[in-house]
Image (cartoon, rainbow, N blue to C red):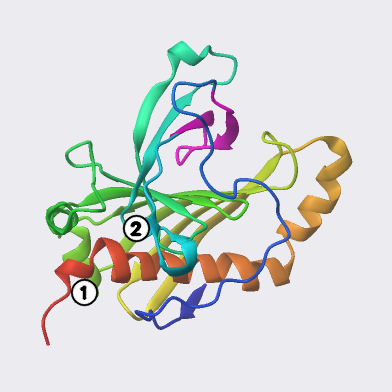
């Protein structure tokens, strides 16, 4: 199924979702972490916790504002049932600049986190054939793995070579371990559009919420308003963030 789209350098409005929780990263420095269950990009069930070290800038009138690339802390992951001491570092967390979402980027070729406050670090992605993007906030926890076969991802994106995008998006509907997830394998072809190659749904919900969640998640409206918009956003992530500094000069 092919869909045409235009990636804009100005972020499009995101459809409002009636999901609560995960409205940012939470946790105390040195304190006990509040673990949130989620589905990883490989479809395994993990738990994630955040150690918050926020950096904000005070604006006029006492208003505080987070800027894109501000360091927010770090995320740790563990398997359900494991102790906190068994957790492993997932990556450094940075502000998206919208005041709601936070991000992690990992260069999978090198296995290193990307410092989003450093333009030179982001520029290094132009040589990578595989990288991973996490987004947290607004009731959603999403991971996307971008990969290209022949060329580095960013070069492929701007030349129109198909890019594989494997995304797992967790939508929270209640408690920290109650969610359903979309698992999508898609091809993104530059500014031309995307093709969904596989779409699956996973539900981690009590029986009292399962029927309603399945009905909502598998509806045509959810596909149009949420899934397809999310795939368009994945293109904008490449254009506006990960491959921005690799954009060919006109």
Toward the bottom, the furthest residue is 250
Is 179 located above or below residue 9 in the figure? above
Q: Residues within 10 Å of mark 1 (few under 14, many from 20)?
A: some
Look at the image and tell me in which quarter the C terminus lies. bottom left
Q: Residue at x 13, y 78 (%)?
A: 248
Secondary element under disc 1, as helix, strand or loop, is helix
Q: Which residue is mark 1?
A: 158
* Residue at point 71%, 72% (across, down): 221
Q: Residue at x 54, y 13 (%)?
A: 82
Residue placed most toward the observer, 112 or 94: 94
User: 213 or 54, which lies in front?
Assistant: 54
Report the label total.
2
Determine whether, in the image, residue 79 is placed left or right of residue 75: right
Q: Residue at x 73, y 47 (%)?
A: 173
Q: Whole-Å distance between the Cαs marked 2 and 1?
A: 14 Å
Provide residue 42's location: percent of width, then percent of height. Answer: 45, 37
Where residue 238 appears, x then y in whole percent?
31, 65
Instruction: Name, please, the residue furthest toward the front.
Output: 61
- Crowding at dot 2, Cα within 10 Å, few <14 / some 14-19 / many 20+, comes out as many
- Asked if the stretch drawn in magenta spans residue 43, the answer is yes
Between disc 2 and disc 1, whose residue precedes? 1
On screen, residue 190 versus residue 211, left or right, reads left
Q: Nearer the viewer, residue 133 or 70?
A: 70
The reply to whether residue 195 is visible in this rendering is: no
Residue 106's tag is: none
Residue range in magenta is: 33-51
Q: Secondary structure at mark 2?
A: strand
Label 2 belongs to which residue?
Answer: 164
């Amino acid at each position: 199924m092919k869909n045409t789209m235009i990636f804009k350098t100005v972020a499009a409005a995101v459809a409002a979702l009636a999901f609560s929780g995960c409205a940012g990263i939470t946790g105390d420095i040195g304190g006990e972490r509040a673990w949130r269950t989620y589905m990883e990009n490989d479809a395994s069930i993990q738990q994630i916790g955040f150690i918050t070290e926020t950096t904000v800038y005070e604006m006029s009138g006492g208003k505080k504002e987070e800027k894109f690339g501000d360091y927010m802390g770090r995320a740790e992951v563990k398997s359900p049932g494991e102790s906190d001491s068994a957790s492993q570092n997932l990556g450094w967390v940075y502000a998206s600049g919208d005041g709601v979402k936070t991000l992690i980027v990992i260069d999978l070729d090198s296995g290193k986190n990307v410092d989003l406050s450093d333009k030179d670090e982001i520029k290094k992605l132009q040589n990578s054939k595989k990288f991973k993007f996490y987004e947290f906030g607004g009731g959603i926890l999403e991971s996307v793995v971008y990969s290209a076969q022949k060329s580095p991802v960013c070069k492929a994106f701007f030349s129109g070579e198909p890019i594989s995008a494997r995304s797992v998006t967790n939508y929270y509907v209640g408690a920290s371990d109650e969610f359903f997830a979309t698992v999508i394998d898609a091809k993104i072809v530059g500014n031309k559009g995307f093709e969904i190659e596989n779409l699956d749904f996973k539900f981690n919900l009590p029986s009292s919420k399962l029927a309603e969640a399945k009905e909502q998640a598998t509806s045509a409206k959810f596909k149009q308003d949420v899934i397809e918009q999310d795939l368009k956003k994945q293109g904008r992530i490449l254009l506006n963030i990960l491959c921005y500094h690799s954009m060919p000069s006109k």
